[in-house]
Image (cartoon, grey):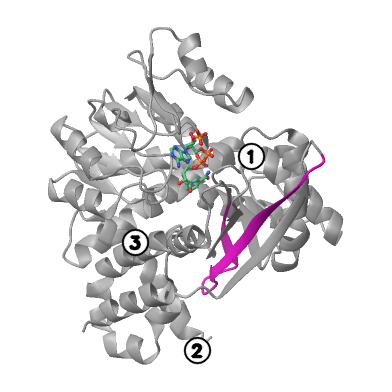
């Protein structure tokens, strides 16, 4: 049996009931074969893949807090410190009721490769809770964040582990988490990224993942003789990644006609109006029905995954960018996109496309970029925030944006060249996985059996 298959079977046996983690490992190991075969005996002897697929440390803790009615609530808290071969653990915190240990292992594993691709010295980690910030008062969110940090602070630090935001964790949550860390430790340090501008945050961090996605898309299109200008683009999600992907795509002359949340989606024939979207989502924290009320020319479709109603991927487009959550684009969605003439899928979320859908898309000759490459702009800019904190300096928006643009172009070049080197030209999934892997594997080998 090939080494990668042995290791995959081991991961499934040792991590029961964690299907998303199995899926991420399967997708990565499946594409690493040509790189593994070059050094299979060495890697096998050193159990390199077994170590790569096992987190260095998992921290699991109780998060008790008091709601506005005086009732004590209890949530699960997690931090998965996956791999520190190339730098301190780095990766976001997700607060969403669907969060399990398996979700965070998948995300931490993916993060290791993504961080490697950025070229910056950051290891892989991820954390979060099954807490749902939706519908909670600011005081309740603060109480939860403080209790979460009351345990987490022992395990993080500017040179150890630097968490950031993710689904359900934006500027408000990062502020409460940072305040509690400072109170507990007495240290004012760059222990979290995504901070507010008044206390050590970086300009352009808010925009970075969405902008970075579009910079990557632009590079990928140019390489293939196309351009964003004049293209119709379908985007899912209405959160941080989606909002700034829409903004940048429209700045570059694309027309984005959709956005979505977990209860429905908008089709706006005039192009999504970003100020309206920001008002609804960032200020009012409201549903997309409000967008429709403010832009009556748009159409609102109530939709929940699996309820039988048409989803966002049934919209005719040239380019599709899934920017909401994992496994949101399934085989039927891929078929609808291909049938409607879409020629490119660029992932903004983490693993939003199922394995079957990815294979269908690639098999039909569409351009496809995996999230770990095309959404790496967020963590890359977090890396730039860490540099600014260490230097005690703040760079201008343009400085950070230019660095981000350069990093996304470099990631695309590295991914495309690696794919070609291993005989898979145009297969950016393989290119990203191998390019991310080689750097981490080299560092692990150099550091011995730890
Ligand atoms: P946000 O919480 O800001 O937004 C998430 C969006 O996706 C919301 O519109 C939300 O709708 C929707 N959504 C979330 N879960 C589901 C679900 N189960 N079904 C349908 N819709 C859902 O998160 P981000 O924009 O920050 O993150 C989006 C994706 O991008 C995630 O996969 C994240 O891991 C990834 N990512 C984020 C980075 C960042 O810098 N923020 C960096 C790299 C990757 P609703 O409000 O109704 O729940």
Residue at disc 3, secondary structure: helix
Instruction: Point out the frontmost of discs 2 and 1.
Output: 1
Where residue 403 appears, x then y in whole percent? 50, 46
Image quadrant in which you'd find residue 440: bottom left
Where residue 80 appears, x then y in whole percent? 57, 65
**Compared to 13, does 67 lie above or below?**
above
Q: Are marks 3 and 2 in contact (CB under 8 Å)?
A: no
Per the image, the residue denoted by label 2 is: 449
Image quadrant in which you'd find residue 266: top left
Q: Residues within 10 Å of mark 2 (few under 14, many from 20)?
A: few
Q: What secondary structure is the stretch in magenta mostly built from?
A: strand
Q: Mark 2 and mark 1: span between their CA atoms?
A: 41 Å
How many marks the image carries: the answer is 3
What residue lies at 42% left-to-right and 29% top-to-bottom? 260
Q: Mark 3 and mark 1: span between their CA atoms?
A: 27 Å
Magenta residues, start to end: 70-93
Relative to the observer, which residue lies in front, 382 or 103?
Answer: 103
Residue 70 shows which numbered tag? none
Q: Is residue 64 magenta?
A: no
Of pointers 3 and 2, the one earlier in the residue sequence = 3
Instruction: Point out the frontmost of discs 3 and 2.
Output: 3
Per the image, the residue denoted by label 1 is: 133
* Residue 264 in the figure: left or right of residue 60: left
What residue lies at 31% left-to-right and 66% top-to-bottom? 26
* Residue 184 in the figure: left or right of residue 164: right
Relative to the observer, which residue lies in front, 273 or 315?
Answer: 315
What residue lies at 60% left-to-right and 54% top-to-bottom? 128
Of pointers 2 and 1, the one earlier in the residue sequence = 1
Q: Is residue 84 magenta?
A: yes
Per the image, the residue denoted by label 3 is: 23
């Amino acid at each position: 049996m090939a080494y990668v298959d042995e290791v995959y079977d081991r991961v499934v046996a040792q991590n029961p009931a964690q299907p998303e983690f199995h899926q991420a490992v399967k997708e990565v190991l499946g594409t690493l074969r040509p790189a593994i075969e070059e050094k299979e005996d060495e890697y096998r002897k050193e159990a390199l893949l077994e170590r790569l697929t096992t987190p260095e440390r998992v921290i699991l803790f109780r998060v008790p807090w008091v709601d506005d009615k005086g009732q004590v609530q209890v949530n699960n808290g997690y931090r998965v410190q996956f791999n520190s071969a190339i730098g301190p653990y780095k990766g976001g915190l997700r607060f969403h009721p669907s969060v399990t240990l398996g979700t965070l292992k998948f995300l931490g594993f993916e993060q290791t490769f993504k961080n490697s691709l950025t070229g910056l010295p950051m290891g892989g980690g991820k954390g979060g809770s099954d807490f749902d910030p939706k519908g909670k008062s600011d005081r309740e969110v603060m109480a939860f964040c403080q209790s979460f940090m009351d345990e987490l602070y022992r395990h993080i630090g500017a040179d150890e582990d630097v968490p950031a935001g993710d689904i359900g964790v934006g500027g408000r949550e990062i502020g409460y988490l940072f305040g509690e860390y400072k109170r507990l430790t007495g240290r004012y340090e760059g222990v979290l990224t995504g901070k507010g501008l008044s206390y050590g945050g970086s300009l352009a961090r808010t925009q970075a993942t969405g902008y970075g996605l579009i910079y990557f898309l632009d590079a990928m299109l140019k390489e293939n003789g196309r351009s964003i200008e004049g293209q119709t683009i379908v985007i899912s999600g209405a959160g941080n990644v989606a909002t700034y992907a829409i903004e940048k795509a429209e700045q570059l002359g694309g027309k984005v006609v959709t956005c979505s949340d977990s209860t429905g989606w908008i089709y706006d024939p005039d192009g999504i109006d970003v100020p309206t979207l920001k008002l609804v989502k960032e200020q009012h924290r409201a549903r997309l029905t409000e967008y429709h009320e403010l832009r009556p020319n748009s159409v609102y479709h109530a939709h929940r995954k699996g309820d039988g109603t048409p989803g966002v991927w049934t919209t005719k487009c040239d380019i599709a960018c899934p920017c909401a959550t994992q496994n949101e684009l399934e085989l039927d969605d891929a078929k609808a996109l291909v049938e409607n003439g879409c020629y490119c899928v660029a992932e903004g979320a983490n693993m939003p496309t199922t394995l079957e859908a990815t294979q269908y898309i690639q098999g039909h000759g569409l351009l496809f970029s995996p999230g770990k490459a095309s959404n790496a702009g967020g963590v890359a800019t977090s890396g730039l925030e860490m540099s600014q904190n260490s230097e005690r300096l703040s760079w201008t928006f343009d400085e950070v944006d230019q660095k981000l643009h350069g990093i996304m172009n470099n990631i695309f070049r590295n991914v495309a060249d690696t794919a070609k080197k291993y005989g898979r030209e145009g297969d950016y999934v393989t290119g990203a996985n191998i390019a991310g892997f080689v750097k981490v594997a080299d560092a692990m080998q150099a550091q011995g059996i730890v």
